[in-house]
Image (cartoon, grey):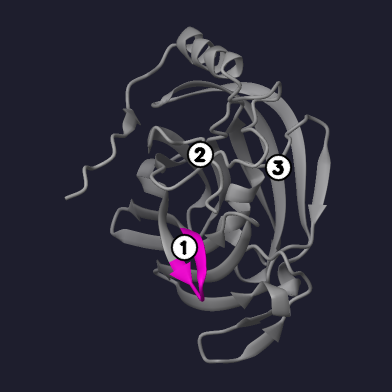
Amino acid sequence: MSTPRPTFDRRARVPARLTAAVVALLTLAGLADAAGQAPEGRLPFQVGERLVYQVRVAKLGTIGKGVMSVEGPEDVRGEQTYRLRFSFKTRVGPVKAVNQSESWVDPRRMIALRFHKHERHPLSRHDEAVEIYPDQRRWEEADGTMRKSTTDAPLDELSFMYFLRTLPLTPDTVYTFTRHFDPARSPTTVRVVRRETITTGAGEFPTVLVEMRVKDPRRYRGEGVIRINISEDPCRLPVRIESAMPLVGTGVLTLESYTHPPEHFAEHPR
């Protein structure tokens, strides 16, 4: 019988000086570079990571919880993948909403091979199940319809969030990517805005504010803006996420706690 791996769970508020000390120790140990990134050839996330968020809307207060997690490895057409999950449930009075996304990602190439989405809101429903074939530059809808892609390094809306964590985040830098598996959803523009310190239920974090402009005709009726504060440490945690939400307006997800295994900085699986 295998022994469960230990995990670290941070739920209490952490003083800023302790956070700085941990980053300093990691840097001395060679686990972080000057920009607070994971070393080359490694990811800032891995199987076992679980991020819990409080969901708030101005004028309404806390309306729900959100969870982002990394599971696996799972086999997809002979490839070992990480299964990324993002779900949140909200409630405003009698009105409930559910949003769940799953992305199966090849962590060696950081490309998506499968994507599922399930949404339920009082005024809308949406389900999506997509198989993505990067080398053939095509993707397949749930009904078997084949679509062309313009990239051999595709991502979806969820895996793009994790991809952001791997980028050099230097303020005043702008990136443009044409990597969404659906050409109608490209390009995605990423602007690194500024550094700022964010205090959450999980502690105080030096972060970099990133503004991502995405094309999503169904949700945003054109272009949408997502603002993400990413921690300046090797974990590159999305500490705060601000985006439009159906019915209630702009929602803010703030990190409440996070859990990750001690092998957080392990190299890509071979």
Indicate whether 209 appears above or below 227. Answer: above
Q: Hey, what amino acid is under mark 2?
A: Ala
Indicate whether 15 appears above or below 6. Answer: above
Residue depicted at x 65% and y 42% = 41
Q: Earlier in the sequence, mark 2 or mark 3?
A: 3
Q: Hey, what amino acid is under mark 1?
A: Ser
The crowd level at tag 1 (other Cα within 10 Å; few <14, some 14-19, many 20+) is: many
Q: Which residue is mark 2?
A: 266
Could you tell me residue 83's position as x and y percent? Answer: 45, 59
Q: Give the residues drawn in magenta, as a range.
A: 75-82
Residue 220 within the magenta-colored segment of the rendering: no
The crowd level at tag 3 (other Cα within 10 Å; few <14, some 14-19, many 20+) is: many
Could you tell me residue 241's position as x and y percent? Answer: 55, 41
Checking the image for residue 101, the label placed there is 1
Q: Which residue is mark 3?
A: 211
- Front tag of 3 and 1: 1
**Residue furthest out toward the bottom:** 144
Could you tell me residue 42's position as x and y percent? Answer: 60, 40
Disc 2 secondary structure class = loop
In this orientation, which residue lies closer to the viewer: 77 or 18? 77
